Image (spheres, helix red, strand yellow):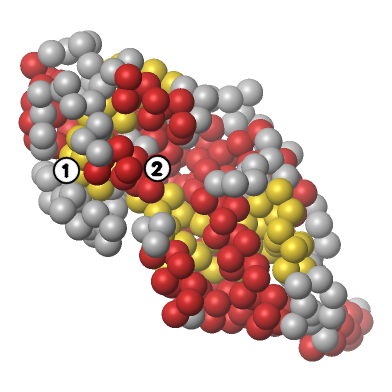
Amino acid sequence: MKFLRLLALGAFCLCNAAMAAGFPDKPIKLVVPLAPGGSTDMVARMLGEKMGQALGQPVIIENRAGAGGSIGSDYVAKSAPDGYSLLMGTIGTLAVTPSLYKSLPYDSDAAFAPISLTTGAQFVLVANPAVQARTVGELMQLIKDNPGKLNYGSAGNGSTPHLGMELLQQMTGTQITHVPYRGSGPMISALLGGEVQIGMPDLPSALPHIKAGKLVALGVTSTQRAATAPDIPTMDESGVKGFDVVSWLGILAPAGTPQAIIDTLNKAATDALRSTEMRNRLAESDISVYATPPGEFAAYIKSERSKWDHIVTLSGATIN
């Protein structure tokens, strides 16, 4: 009996090795679980093009949006673990959605094999110019002195701008009324029009309005200043020690994908991300490159899920 198990294991290993040796021999599908046109879609298309050149097979981008990214994620989770169907995972789909949704059609803890953390982009705490605060400290004091009088806008319940503001309130002992909008665009319009006084949009979307003097930038949300806006201090520098909110992306395969294939895809992705061409193109949008080994990405997902599970619970946000 033991001999048969060893024989079966050997056959399985040989089969996987043979599969990996010829990989890839056809186009690879990279699923973006969001609509076309956003920054996630942009990064996926840039990365897919460079990976395809390295692998000798095209990497085709397929958008499968809906249900907070769970439709596209479910598609990849239930695809064959052969390296030909990949997921462009996001902070939302991997760290927030498992806590935000009461049920998902896949096991978020066991459905995927991480390949590489790819990129990250930061947000910025902004205020309408009518708000009498020009630093994070001044804003926090203003909120404490005027309870219930200031509102903040977000891109919707459970969005990163919502949960980032919830984290800020937790860390500073403040309370601000939440006004959700249907996306980042309407949130910024509300900030510009004074419907809400505070928000935490992504930096690329907010920067033109900051430069035009229509929004006041108080602090960027990563632990390092932005290359495109070096004059804006970080939240950490501004007194909210340890504040770190980054919208990150990473590539994953279905669980059970042979390690040799994971390693091949990791090399193609990290080489592409570290290329001068791609670094320069991403820097234009103030997007940072990470490019990590699979194990490091797996650990990062675990830590981020724990962090955001706590914030989702505190916020009371939930989606059926």
Quarter occupied by the N terminus: bottom right
Question: Residue 211 vs residue 256: left or right?
Answer: left
Q: Residue at x 64, y 46 (%)?
A: 36
Q: Is residue 264 above or below residue 193?
A: below
SS at mark 2 in the image: helix
Instruction: Please identify the quarter of the rendering in which residue 198 is found.
Output: top left
State yes or no: discs 1 and 2 in contact (Cβ < 8 Å): no
Of 186 and 164, which appears nearest the observer? 186
Residue at (74%, 54%) from the top-left corner? 62
Q: Is residue 82 left or right of residue 137?
A: right
The percent coordinates of residue 17 (x first, y second) are 79, 86
- The amino acid type found where label 2 is placed reads Ser
x and y, in percent, of residue 148 in the image: 22, 11
Task: Report the Cα–Cα distance between label 1 and label 2.
Answer: 23 Å
Q: Which residue is mark 2?
A: 205
Local packing at callout 1 (Cα closer than 10 Å; few below 14, some 14-19, many 20+) is some
Q: Is residue 106 visible?
A: no
Q: Secondary structure at mark 1?
A: loop
Q: Residue at x 55, y 52 (%)?
A: 40
Q: What amino acid is found at the position of numbered circle 1 in the picture?
A: Val
Q: Which residue is mark 1?
A: 240
Q: How packed is label 2: few (under 14 Cα within 10 Å), some, or many (20 or more)?
A: some
Asked where in the image residue 209 lies, by quadrant, the reply is: top left
Query: Earlier along the polypeptide chain: callout 1 or callout 2?
Result: 2
Is residue 189 in view from this perspective? yes
x then y, percent, for residue 267: 59, 81
Could you tell me which quadrant the C terminus lies in? top right
Is 45 placed left or right of 231 in the picture?
right
The residue that appears at 60% across and 60% down in the rendered structure is: 44
Nearer mark to the viewer, of 1 and 2: 2
| x, y percent for residue 261 | 71, 78
